Amino acid sequence: MDYRLNEKISAWTLADLRQSVGWNRMEQELGNPKLQDFLTIACYDNSELIGYVSVVSNGVLDAYIQDLMVRPDYQNKGIGTELMNKVISHIKEKGIYMISVIYGEEGLKGFYERFGFYTMLCGQMETYKSK
């Protein structure tokens, strides 16, 4: 597996990965030039994108792990764990105070707890309408 930091990936390629994990494609939004991540790590098997994590941050106080995706046929092989280890290490090296993550399935709680995340009260509102 080849892990790459902050590599430019086409909106179409990211949309395909999103779709493979059951998420909406959001291809138009992913291609918006205003979209800027603090950090991305992509995982490739040969030239095929099979895993990806993105982080939004103000660079000082907070970092938010926004998307962690591993193609279903590559899940349970340690790729998500490696992506998390790399992203957490990078954020810590930058001296950022806090890392947050929101996950939508109760079954993922144990995965994130392994890295030291704990449950807090939070709220979220989705305003995206698929076209």
Image (cartoon, rainbow, N blue to C red):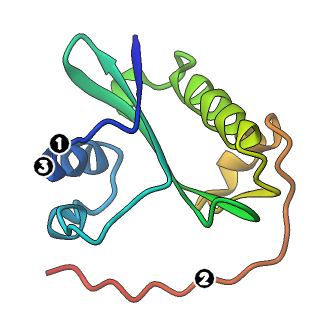
Residue 97, labelled with which disc? Answer: none
From the viewer's perspective, tell me whether residue 74 is left or right of residue 107: left
Whether 43 is drawn above or below 99: the answer is above
* Picture residue at 57% right of the left edge, 18% below the top: 78
Q: Earlier in the sequence, mark 1 or mark 2?
A: 1
* Picture residue at 27% right of the left edge, 63% below the top: 24
Graded by Cα atoms within 10 Å as few (under 14), some (14 to 19) or many (20 or more), the crowding at tag 3 reads some
| Residue denoted by label 2 | 124
| Residue denoted by label 1 | 13
Percent x, y of residue 94: 70, 43
Alpha carbon of mark 1 to alpha carbon of mark 3: how far?
A: 4 Å
| SS at circle 2 | loop
From the viewer's perspective, tell me whether residue 116 is left or right of residue 122: right
* Picture residue at 50% right of the left edge, 54% below the top: 38
Q: What amino acid is at disc 3? A: Trp
Query: Are circles 1 and 3 on residues that touch, CB within 8 Å?
Result: yes
Which is more toward the observer, 33 or 80? Answer: 33
Percent x, y of residue 126: 46, 84
Alpha carbon of mark 1 to alpha carbon of mark 2: how far?
A: 27 Å
Q: What amino acid is at disc 1? A: Thr
Whether 130 is drawn above or below 60: the answer is below
Percent x, y of residue 108: 66, 47
In the rendered image, the quadrant that contains the N terminus is top left
Residue 12, labelled with which disc? Answer: 3
Alpha carbon of mark 3 to alpha carbon of mark 2: how far?
A: 27 Å
From the viewer's perspective, tell me whether residue 18 is left or right of residue 42: left
Graded by Cα atoms within 10 Å as few (under 14), some (14 to 19) or many (20 or more), the crowding at tag 1 reads some
Tag in front: 3 or 2 = 3
Graded by Cα atoms within 10 Å as few (under 14), some (14 to 19) or many (20 or more), the crowding at tag 2 reads few
